[in-house]
Amino acid sequence: MGIQNDDPHAAEYRAALERLVIAPTFEMSLRQSLIMSNGTWTIFFGRPIAAVLLAVSATLLILSAISFFMKRKDWRTKLAEAEQAEPKP
């Protein structure tokens, strides 16, 4: 069982701590990869699995953006309909 924490911002604190720990490791790995490839970024796209993962990530990002804008448009449409339905004094 984990420790109970009544702080509503506990998840935010945990995420910030994880970023502080992971960011230097990620940066070091990125630098090592670029040094191994003599500074070319193609090392991240050259292998088939890397290309597949990049394509999946890009697809998910695009679908997320489309969903966000569709919900935003839907919200505005609902607001306009609600304003039109209200009786004016």
Image (cartoon, grey):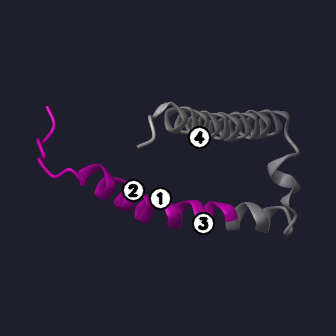
Residue 86 location in percent, x, y? 45, 34
Location of mark 2 (residue): 18
- Secondary structure type for disc 1: helix
Q: Residues within 10 Å of mark 3 (few under 14, many from 20)?
A: few
Of tags 4 and 2, the one toward the viewer is 4
Q: Is residue 11 above or below residue 84?
A: below
**What quarter of the picture does the N terminus occupy?**
top left
Query: What span is colored magenta in the figure?
Result: 1-30
Q: CA distance from mark 1 to mark 3?
A: 9 Å
- Secondary structure type for disc 4: helix
**In percent of the image, x 88 and y 45: which residue is there?**
46
Q: CA distance from mark 4 to mark 1?
A: 39 Å
Is the Cβ of the residue at disc 1 closer than 8 Å to that at disc 3? Answer: no
Mark 3: which amino acid?
Glu
Location of mark 1 (residue): 22
Q: Is residue 41 magenta?
A: no
Location of mark 4 (residue): 76
Pick whichever of labels 1 and 3 is earlier in the sequence: 1
Foreground residue among 46 and 77: 77
Q: Is residue 4 magenta?
A: yes
Mark 4: which amino acid?
Arg
Foreground residue among 5 and 75: 75
